[in-house]
Image (spheres, coloured by chain):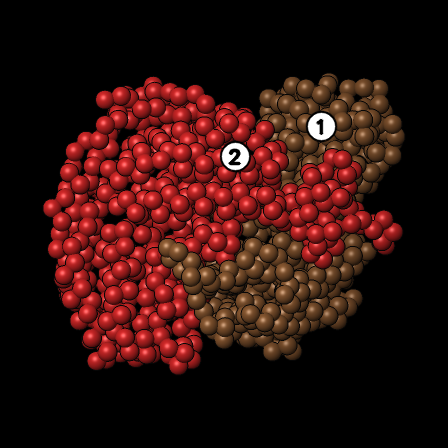
Chain colours: A brown, B red
Amino acid sequence: MGTKVQYLGYTTSSLGSDSFTAINPQDGQTIEGLFVDATSEEINKAVVLAEKAFSVYKKTTNETRTAFLEAIASEIENLGDELINTGMQETALPQARLQGERGRTCGQLRFFASIVKEGSYVDARIDTAMPDRAPIPKPDIRQMSIALGPVAVFGASNFPLAFSVAGGDTASALAAGCPVIFKAHPAHPNTSDLVASAIIKAAQNTGMPDGVFSMVHGRANRVGEELVKHPAVKAVGFTGSFRGGKALFDLANQREEPIPVYAEMGSTNPVFILPGALKDAKGLATGMIGSISLGVGQFCTNPGLSFIPQTEDGKAFIDAITEYVTASDGGTMLTQGIKSAYEAGKANLEVQSGVQSLARSKKPPSSAGVEAQIYQVSTKEFSNNPILAREVFGPSSVIVNYKDKEDILTIARNLDGHLTATVHGTPEDFKEYRELFDILEGKVGRILINGFPTGVEVCHSMVHGGPFPATTASQTTSVGGNAIQRFVRPVSYQNFPDDLLPEQLKNRNSLKIMRLIDGELTRA
Amino acid sequence: MGTKVQYLGYTTSSLGSDSFTAINPQDGQTIEGLFVDATSEEINKAVVLAEKAFSVYKKTTNETRTAFLEAIASEIENLGDELINTGMQETALPQARLQGERGRTCGQLRFFASIVKEGSYVDARIDTAMPDRAPIPKPDIRQMSIALGPVAVFGASNFPLAFSVAGGDTASALAAGCPVIFKAHPAHPNTSDLVASAIIKAAQNTGMPDGVFSMVHGRANRVGEELVKHPAVKAVGFTGSFRGGKALFDLANQREEPIPVYAEMGSTNPVFILPGALKDAKGLATGMIGSISLGVGQFCTNPGLSFIPQTEDGKAFIDAITEYVTASDGGTMLTQGIKSAYEAGKANLEVQSGVQSLARSKKPPSSAGVEAQIYQVSTKEFSNNPILAREVFGPSSVIVNYKDKEDILTIARNLDGHLTATVHGTPEDFKEYRELFDILEGKVGRILINGFPTGVEVCHSMVHGGPFPATTASQTTSVGGNAIQRFVRPVSYQNFPDDLLPEQLKNRNSLKIMRLIDGELTRA
């Protein structure tokens, strides 16, 4: 069993001694490939290289960074079936899902490449001088966003490609001009190793500076902590649990120089089923079950909470859900640890006052196999017990029966921050429940109508974020075009001669980007 | 001596018992008007009112908020000479300065009004549906920024109008649609009282909801702490000392729901004088002294640190500075406390190894009168002692003599975060020292060439911010058009029927704002 390496820029290293392997969640067996926790020396080397690379990489042209991002996508595609097969072995996710996720990952890299190529994301602004203004002359002032510095990115377990090594955080940080030091998730180290090697290849082929990308492994918290505490790291991207994200957030704020932590920590993604939506109770139940069990419930946007009216139609919906879940097969989770956490979360729900188990699926015989499960609780019990609104990561969901509009509005007002909220209904329902939307706007990053929250489209207008505790940075998104804004900051240039200005701010606008000139948006 | 009140929305209140008065810094005498620290009950009432007001205020049209901001400017102007006279009495700032500052304050309110009126600041984005896309249809997704919630704003001592009650933080938060609870600075409570009454009048006259603005007084830290800890407060604006800003930042991060703190905490604003700039050593020295002593050195952008070459010209510059300072009168600081801190800061400088006093001005006989003072130190001593780079708030400045380019680049690389950096030189100097600009970009919010940092223009492209410890939020600015972005967050609307969408996202674009539609910026 060969020992795998840390990628410290273009050098590989293997100094540590605390080793681990991936485990196949289907059969519980060890997967070939011995991984080692990065040593303090290795972590420091990766960050120091990133800091050095930054001084070169931040000055690369948009074209150069575009070529790099596109090359990463191509190199990931060049990994071919080996990537998919390795991912399947490490995560128990099916082939079609991983192929789709690869498409999403490469599409996302090309999407950020297109944003960099277009170039207007730097928010260039020019206020021209008024030398004759009284009582004091107005100087020429120009502003644009520049790259923040080296970024530490933590991979998520549940999307071994799209939210991992070359996922959205890495893609948007590299797009912004920031080197990335990636902390691989120990649940899929072989998959991570393949993708890291693809990024390194792309970086070398497109002439990027040594250190623009590094990847370290680690099962111990120490590895991530040392990364976040390193003075040269200027921001952190994270997707994972509340406990993990909040710990990194606290650590970053306790540094001598606090740095931003963009932690997406999941949520229960409430679904409000208004009375009129239940005309087709069975169809809606099918969609709902599909969303709850997608990826064995291992989506940050998994609908873990739904509100159903106490009507005949509501009962029909619940009956349909019960029937479908009972007949379904369950699934295999990503790791033994995630399975244990899921089972502990369910056990904790089951001892809460008023919680009824409605339906339980079969359970596959695999090592990390679990059953899907639906619970039911009254509005009153729900309102009195915040535990019922907390995420249980996996294919379980809590149904709350509501009596009337006031019930729904009260529940909405008391919600914590979530990534999404969904409302199902007819145009008449929406008129009647208009206030619900006003309330939800203040609680989530994305509101959906008559859909399911589990698809997170990579596009300019996506917000994958939301108020705490869904994230530690409600004013940002970790998916979509604006994700790049997390890794830049604005700088003003006052009274600069044209030749000293960055290309984006020179008079001629050779990049033809949109700029705010004396208050007017123009490409002139 | 009448007792002054807290403004809790449209109600006034005076429940507390810990009273204080303003002190005239010229004669040390008590100024009429008894102020009382707000009680916990009063603070809570202000925030609860703000939370209630928020549900109405966030839904106001751009026109309505524009009218409100413009009305505030008019009501401040309507205060007439009383405002200027009160300000002079409380701050010892001269009439012309306060008149100018009033102009800046009202201009700033109207500037944000114009940004709201234009409307594009919400960054509207539309990705249209592709129902036939394979393998899964693309939904219609739209995004815009919405108001964050009630904001607590802390006034600065040094700009009793422009960075106080109706200053940039208040103006930008109100512009964004956020109610403001203002914590008045105890150095100018009567000035604050007048401005608060003007805001309240403007709010009532333009039909704003009760609670859109409140102002509480307090000398005790408790008042500010209770504000920041209140669960309904969603962001904090602050201008002041490092100690104060960092304390609020830590407090906000320790909340159950952490919230952003936008603290601008000042800096020493290094000035690099390159050799060619010294052709006119006397002219440059005059400009420099003007900037150092402007407002008795009580500017966040006061140049507290400059780097001068060890040349004949450099000596001439230092001689000129020495001559001007020695002949000058000193000034009266804002408060006794600020004077004491200034004198302690100078005393601390004077005991540092290698620090020489170059020149000291006269000292006015006023109660809070101080002398301006210039110190000199070698590059070596400077590099070994971080204390020499720290801000001493007031009209003092440290001159560091450098030998060569390598000296300058090394010093620049080791700088902490600052609000500004300034470079004086000729086109030849800039070619020779090109790397200096690359380094400074990473250290400050604004770089100036051949100017002085003390003027902070209110315009679209101003960045009044910078890396920690200059601020707690290097990705934002507290002056200029982008200041509004601190108080909004993005929300996605997926699959919404047109009539349920906010006006900015409806198909027809009745506001004619710039929107990113399927990746194209357009007003269509």
The amino acid beneath tag 1 is Arg
Q: Residue at x 56, y 60 (%)?
A: A517
Is residue B96 at all visible to an observer of this figure?
A: yes
Q: Which residue is mark 1?
A: A434
Secondary structure of residue under mark 2:
helix
Q: Give the letter of the chain under mark 2.
A: B
Is residue B410 at all visible to an observer of this figure?
A: no
**Category of crowding for the residue at label 1, using alpha-carbon neighbours closer than 10 angstroms: few (below 14), some (14–19), many (at least 20):** few
**Category of crowding for the residue at label 2, using alpha-carbon neighbours closer than 10 angstroms: few (below 14), some (14–19), many (at least 20):** many
Please tell me whether residue A413 is drawn above or below residue A447 in the rendered image.
above
Q: Position of residue B56 (x, y in %)?
A: 59, 28
**Would residue A142 be found to the left or right of residue B332 on screen?**
right
**Would residue A73 be found to the left or right of residue A314 on screen?**
left
Q: Using the image as rendered, state which of residue A80 and residue B466 is in the foreground.
A: B466
Q: Position of residue B499 (x, y in %)?
A: 76, 35
Q: Quadrant of residue A120?
A: bottom right
Q: Which residue is mark 2?
A: B68
